[in-house]
Amino acid sequence: MKPKFTPYYETLVRNYEAANPGVKVEWVDFPWDIIQTKLVTRIVAGTPPALVNLNVPWADEFARDGLLAPVDKLLGEARPRYLASTLQDLTFNGKTYGFPMYSNVAVIAYNTQIFKAAGIPHAPRELDEQLLFARQIAARTGKAGLCPALSKIDGLMMQQGLAVIANGKAVFNSPGHVALIRKLAETYKAGGLLKDALFAEDNFPAAIDAYKGGRLGMLLAPPTAVKRIESDAKDIYAITDVAPAPLGPTGIADGGWLIHYAVPKNVDAKLLPAIGKFARYLTNDANQLAFAKQASVYPAMAQAANDPFFTTVPSNAGAAEKAVAAGAVSMPHSHTLYVAGITDYDELRRYLVKAVEAGVTGKQDIQQALDQAVAIWNKKLAAQGIR
Amino acid sequence: MRKLTAWLFLAPALILLAIFSFWPVAFGSLLAFTDYSLIRETHWVGLDNFRYIFDNEMFVTGLKNSLLFLLMVPFVQIGALSLAVLVNNQLPGIRYFRAAFYVPVVTTVSVVGIMWGFMFHEQGALNYVLRACHLVGAPVGWLSNDTLALFAIMFVTLWRGLGWYMVMYLAALQAVPADMQEAAILDGANRWQRFWKITVPMLRPTIMICSVLSVLAALKAYQEVDVLTQGGPMNSTFTGLYYAYDQGLKHLKLPRALAASFIVSLFCIGIALVCLRYLKPKHR
């Protein structure tokens, strides 16, 4: 957060301390890559922070390890004011483990010139159309149409209504899953998918570079990406238009990644009411809105998310402003797509991604590749006692 | 008394080594046999972590790839020695050549990653040149093809290491006594004979140490993997140590990471001992 958000947090803390005499708040900022280690060390040392900024997969893992305290009682009457989807993301085994702060959601930025050259009249409205347009772009312009984050294929499956796990067993080798991968493989073969880092853990840098270089027809990314295009590639920005990302048959929007405040285990029980009060203050409508405006993200509070800043599009709006509004339409449908409750989930996902990579690139029969990955998952899930 | 003085002189270095090298290695090796976690009580689990990693395709692939990296060792050593012989000549501007070959050694791995990322990209410089010369029809996926990616990374590792070993050979070459060469010239030995009969035997201790270091570096390869492929495509570029890094620092599974490091260390020790046994100079 430092240094960009230092004034924001210092003002928040100052105002809170002024309104609550006797309360002293210390804001400490660590880079993401060391937060987990720092947090575990502090909890073990018996000096946990009162609140900690986490994402959903970490919250799930920490909650399973008994390192977080449920906050249902602390949410109190503020609960209905949060977007229901954000509270659902933080509910594991019937308990809520955080105060939702902000999330993001993807929009489709598309190059109108490439669309015109490919004879595409409008933005895609569903995944099938996205893939069809990508193939059309490749066939008529020789450029890639789309760059999905296939390292998060589990999220895409869930968004498309295809379960990854059911009754404690991996089930991603069903005909539906095979059909989805086959569509991706056909698009890949036709040159419709951008090959750069297609299966890398984070292919966003490759995707945005390709879009800024005019090599990609559609970019599925949060509205902040459109701002980056505006500042880095003015010529491409001038021919960019945006549309909300397709919701998929589940009604879930792509690109959700919720950030929240969690309460670590072993904080002084006497402090819990004060901690709850401060967490509600940090995540109230006004403060979330102020933060979201600065950070170009979406608030997790319903009223803040409906602020005219997000919903009103000025008549002379450029793609960046349109993107903010398009994202706001999808935000209530945004979920962090993640399979909770599994130990070593990242490792298991690697087997899935490897199978999908083999299938999409044509190195192995899709059904066979998925069957092999399912067998590995089920062996490892059984070893975890998940049945 | 002389022994005590010697130990006193060694003591500061030994204390530092004990604290920062011997103890962490010993403690880490011990923890590989436990379920160590910051948040739970630690228990002795015997070989469980080893069973887990050997049951894991990524580690097994990683170990195989670490051994494949050994293929690079002769190329590095022959390349470095050839370069050292070349730049050992007193030619105009030779210092610039020496510096140029050494630049990759002092370049940070992140810069190397970005640079070679551009070079190996399907739309990158390498494919551009190959296509312009009509050597390939379609762009080659140097880092996206699961058969080629590991070799591309090995090439980058070789490129980074060459200058380092070149400098070591250069220093050794310059220490070869000139009178031996002169005597050989008087005896009528040609360049080739002088190289094989005088230079190479004199360089044998350097060849041994460079080979051992190069074997260890090959088995410990992971930085280039991290910056270029992160183990992909299709987990084909995992190395033993990259798996340890991935488990320990990315996923905080320390016992598994330590078990993987333990296995890699065993390989390092074993292969280094073999090198020492067969490359050790027979006569001083």
Image (cartoon, helix red, strand yellow):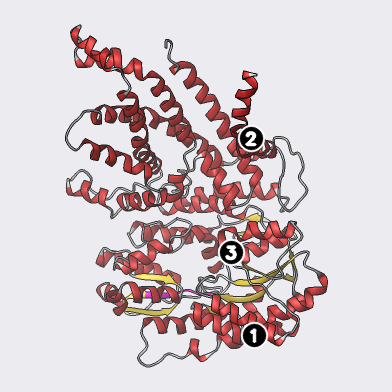
Q: Residue at x 67, y 63 (%)?
A: A60
Look at the numbered discs 3 and 1 and tell me whether their residues touch, using CB distance below 8 Å. Answer: no
Q: Which residues are magenta?
A: A104-109
Q: Amino acid at mark 1?
A: Asn
Q: Amino acid at mark 3?
A: Phe
Q: Is residue B112 left or right of residue A340?
A: left
- Report x, y in % for residue B171: 34, 28
Question: Label 1 lies in what chain?
Answer: A
- Height in image: B265 above or below A36? above
- Height in image: A132 above or below B221? below
Q: Secondary structure at mark 1?
A: helix
Residue at mark 1: A15
Residue at mark 3: A30
Q: CA distance from mark 3 to mark 1?
A: 23 Å
Q: Secondary structure at mark 2?
A: helix
Residue at mark 2: B15
Point out the residue furthest to the bottom here.
Answer: A315
Point out the residue furthest to the right here.
Answer: A270
